[in-house]
Image (cartoon, helix red, strand yellow):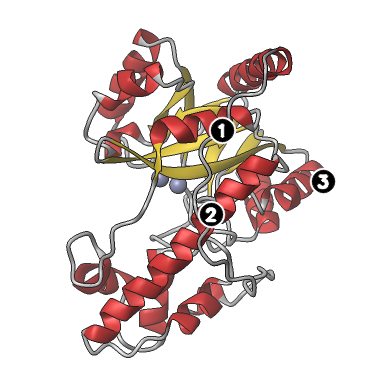
Amino acid sequence: MMYADLHLHSHFSDGTYSPEELAAHARNQRLAAVALTDHDSVEGCARMATACDQLGVECVPGTELTAEHEGNELHLLGYFLDTRHPRLLRELARFQGVRQNRIREIVARLNHLQVPLQSEAVFALANCRSPGRPHVARALVRAGLCGTLDEAFDRFLKKHRPAWVPKCKMLAAEAIQLLHEAGGLAIMAHPGLNHNDKLIPQMVAAGLDGLECFHTKHSPAATVHYLALAKKYALLVTGGSDCHGHNKGRPLIGTIRLPHEHVTRLRERAAQLGAHAAQAPAPASLPNRPVPPQVSEFTPSPPSPWAAV
Ligand SMILES: [Zn+2]
Ligand SMILES: [Zn+2]
């Protein structure tokens, strides 16, 4: 049997491994295929593809977008994307700017609470364009302001804790359209964490292609439940560990083993969509929105001293 893990984060977002390290772990775990799905980023995909190629592992270029639908947050995985698609790159840059501004706001709230952290410390530690709360937590621990990452989240960073800042998200229907426009498939990530299955038919109506039925945070019963829903709505099935390296506990790569036949189905569907897109007129582009200021000095450089925290 051949297996895949289609949900991995590298240090281009909030994972701790480089793409090369992820490829090596994939090989050690005897995975036939992997997908890199960094938050709001496809920057690591080219390096991941090269590293996987050298090790004989199939690599699916991807990303994970944070979106919302009627007040519900949901994550959408994009697979088989054209990682050089101009509008995809423009939109990702816009959301990376949103993430960077959110870090500044979180730090401002911490400062207001007399916690002397500087946003520069978070950006230096993150060393990527898609910083998130896990980077703030690590910066707090590194500065000796919190004992553990859990403490940082529990005291300050979790939803409704005093330094939590709501995140500005793209509309889910727009995110699905964007992933399609970039030649990719749109998959609902870890539906079990949404606690709202009504989102599934609504997203199907918006063009959703599949459901991440296998995920480390799904119980066996949840997996069976989402496999049944995938069948009901004629959706593709995916699965992945959501490995963040040494962030969020132990490295998880390979703990979800998706039968490879699902990767074949995903690839076939992406090829079909690509053929359709080549025939169809170009979709109308979304209204232009202001682009938040970009911080250009975060050129990720491998590997950083992640494990030190
Ligand atoms: Zn997610
Ligand atoms: Zn993820």
Q: Residue at x 49, y 36 (%)?
A: 77
Density class for disc 1 (Cα within 10 Å; few <14, some 14-19, many ≥20) is many
Which residue is identified by label 3? 54
Q: State if disc 2 and disc 1 touch (CB < 8 Å).
A: no
- Look at the picture and state if 142 lies above or below 270: below
* Image-based side of 285 in relation to 103, left or right: right
Which residue is identified by label 1? 179
Does the numbered disc 3 mark a residue whose Cβ is under 8 Å from ligand 2?
no
Residue 207 percent location from the top left of the image: 46, 20
Residue 240 percent location from the top left of the image: 48, 37
Frontmost residue, 119 versus 7? 119
Whichever of callouts 2 and 3 sits on the residue coming sooner in the sequence is 3
- Look at the picture and state if 110 lies above or below 222: below
Whichever of callouts 1 and 3 sits on the residue coming sooner in the sequence is 3
The CA span between labels 1 and 2 is 15 Å
Whichever of callouts 1 and 2 sits on the residue coming sooner in the sequence is 2
Q: Is residue 146 visible?
A: no
Which residue is identified by label 2? 94
Q: Nearer the viewer, mark 2 or mark 3?
A: 2
The CA span between labels 2 and 3 is 33 Å
SS class of the residue under badge 1? Answer: helix
- Look at the picture and state if 57 lies above or below 282: below
**Amino acid type at image mark 1:** Leu
